[in-house]
Image: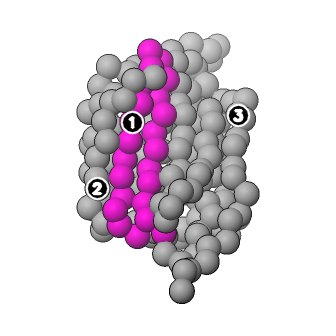
Amino acid sequence: MEPAGNWTLPPDTTAPGVARRIVASALASWRDPDDAVLVASELVTNAVQHGLPPIELNLHLGTDRLRLTVSNAVGTTLNVPRIAAPGADDPDGRGLAIVETLSTEWGWSDTDRMISVWAELIDSPVSVDQTEARGEVVTDREGPPIPQMTSGGPTATSTECLRQASASTLSRTSRKTVSPEIPRTTAS
């Protein structure tokens, strides 16, 4: 994969929107960049909420593959990225579940006061199941069209996207790589 760019993002709530625009622009030639845009938004949101500046977005592109990495500084304690189990009414905690659902692989690493969370995605032809997951009407089956959820794409809320991913018949075989928890100590 070739480097497609490295951007330093603002260390505030505007960063996810900036990341969405960068990824959408970088993947203009992809058939379906929406998953990558949403993954970038979720990873950058986590960096803003749980990390310290600088926040960096790095893209590597292959013919049909993207490796998206978001890095940020850490304080004296490393917040290990892990998939949460939020309640139905909890407003947060679904980001990494969405990343896991949409990526073929994801993981994290840390080096010298920085943590990097990465995800790999493949640009594949749009299938009927993916069309349903995005909320489009499916017409190539017997009987009348089946309307699906209409929220989707990069503007849907995390809860809506997670519901769509869970309800979708799309299944992915994933190899998840997660580093063990590493406690941080401060030098005196």
Tag 1 residue: 59
Relative image position of residue 2 (x, y in whole percent): 39, 24
Of the numbered discs 2 and 1, the one sitting upstream in the chain is: 2
Point out the image quarter for the C terminus.
Answer: bottom right
Distance from disc 3 to disc 2, alpha carbons, whole Å, reads 29 Å
Can you tell which mark lies on residue 174? 3
Tag 2 residue: 9
Relative to 98, is 2 on the left or the right? left
Relative image position of residue 170 (x, y in whole percent): 66, 30
Distance from disc 3 to disc 1, alpha carbons, whole Å, reads 20 Å
Q: Nearer the viewer, residue 51 or 163?
A: 51
Label 1: how many Cα within 10 Å (few below 14, some 14–19, many 20+)? many
Relative to residue 27, is residue 126 depicted above or below?
above
Which is closer to the viewer, label 3 or label 2? 2
| Residue at disc 3, secondary structure | loop
Relative image position of residue 44 (x, y in whole percent): 41, 56
Residue shown at the point (49%, 65%) measured from the top left? 113
- Amino acid type assigned to the residue bearing label 2 in the image: Leu
